[in-house]
Image (cartoon, rainbow, N blue to C red):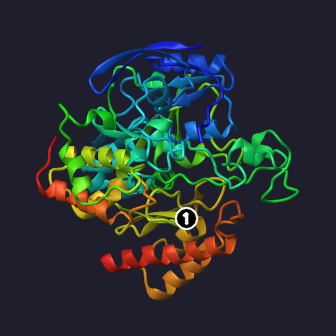
Amino acid sequence: MKQSIRLEINGQVHDLLVAPNQTLLEVLRESLELTGTKRGCDHGACGTCTVLIDGEPHLSCLTLAVAVAGQRIMTIEGLAQGGELHPLQKAFIEKGAVQCGFCTPGMILTAKSILDEEEHPSEDSLRKKMAGNLCRCTGYKKILEAVVSSAKAGLKA
Amino acid sequence: MNTRMPDFEYIQPETVVQVCSMLSQQPGAAVLAGGTDLLVNLKHGFIKPPILIDLRKITGLNLIELTAEGARIGPLATLKKLSTHPAIVAKLPALATAALAVGSYHHQVMGTLGGNICQGNRCSFLNQSAAWRQARPACHKTGGAVCHVVPGSDRCYACYHGELAPVLVTLGALASLTGVDGSRKILIEDLFTGEGKTPIEKAIDEIITGIDIPAEAMSGESLYLKSAIRGSIDFPVLGLALWHSPESKRYRICYTGVGTRPVRAGRVERLLEGHDLHGDLVDEACELATEEAQPVKNTSCPPSAKRHLMKRMLCRVLNQVMGES
């Protein structure tokens, strides 16, 4: 039986009617047309569905929409403010860390959550924490450079 | 691939009493914590609970407390919290190591201690989509009557891969199980049936409400070593937990990924007990370790390689202990 829920996404509140078996990923993409969050493996092994919930990275393909009412959800669409790209997004472009772009939203959000928590994360810590976001294009080098350069710039946003 | 899960009702009770009552009244109901194991199994379609009971509105189940009497950890403590808790890192480091070894960072943020302990057993013939499994007769674990791994077997050999449980076994931990009639405590190792189809030993109305680690565990040293195909995100091919007390020269050793439950290497423990470690003893212990389990080929790793890994990993861990003493 569908349930009426209220989701806060990127600072906006949405009233939705969802079935309990609908994932947050499905609701974001299909009910709210926020297609920046991607469906890759759909079972938690690739990280392309990453969203931030209360600041921490979650796999939205393994999150029930009905379970996250009342929590602050951020998708990649919520990162740029007032038409200005987030410093992480700029770093990814400058370093050439985007090829097909499919992994990019998940990569950026995971990176953001790490940098919000650790002011100067070691490269080791970054590698370990971003290992849940897979990329088939870049070989990861440029992605890591983008995140490391953002960390060095003292990014906290 | 958009895998819609089977229909279910969803409820968020606020007390343990409500959960136990619901479980007793609704056969087949499943409890939900982080969801990183349960939801994948729902997507694969080999479990179809009519109702999901989300535990996360219940307060008091995510505590982490260390005192002189020991440690008490709630089942909803996330793996991330476990791995970063200063007292856990200092006094029970193998717990932190094991928590950091599980899945990816995302899984550690979402996943819980209770969920990791109670994760479903795994087999390369089970953890597949419904479409994949349709090519073969249903196995014991999915309502059929065959085992694709051990032909002719009348039981399920699905393998346990949880990484926190072997550490908890070596720490002498106890699990509190709460049902409609109250609570009881059992050793963590008694939580496992050793049967692949229903791996966890508890009444249908019970849930884990706490893990207690005795103070004695903190007076020894604990280690966890994982072997996996990839350095990140994979289930263990083999996991090895070891606890030892330098003063009393006692050892507790437990493997995961090598049987239908965490496997205690009791004979190796008895061989080592009371002795200082030295080369010949370590060699004998590592050789004996290969006889402590009978792995079957239900993952990509052949049993002979698993037994070899049991020996190699124990060798590495015991050499580390020797080097430190």
Which amino acid lies under the numbered mark 1 shown in the image of this protein? Leu
| Residue in the image at 39% along x and 20% along y | A69
Q: How far across and down, in percent of the image, does residue B290 sit?
A: 63, 74
Q: How far across and down, in percent of the image, does residue A132 sit?
A: 41, 53
Quadrant in the picture for the N terminus of chain B: top right
Residue B165 makes an appearance in the image: yes
Quadrant in the picture for the C terminus of chain B: bottom left
Q: How far across and down, in percent of the image, does residue B282 sit?
A: 49, 81
The residue where tag 1 is placed is: B238
Q: How far across and down, in percent of the image, does residue B233 sit?
A: 46, 56
Q: Is residue B100 left or right of residue A111?
A: right
Relative to the observer, which residue lies in front, B256 or A54? A54
B211 versus A46 height, above or below: above
A31 versus B116 height, above or below: above
Label 1 resides on the chain identified as B
Total numbered circles: 1
Relative to the observer, which residue lies in front, B92 or B155? B155
| Residue in the image at 41% along x and 79% along y | B319
Q: Is residue B141 left or right of residue B262?
A: right
| Residue in the image at 56% along x and 14% along y | A2
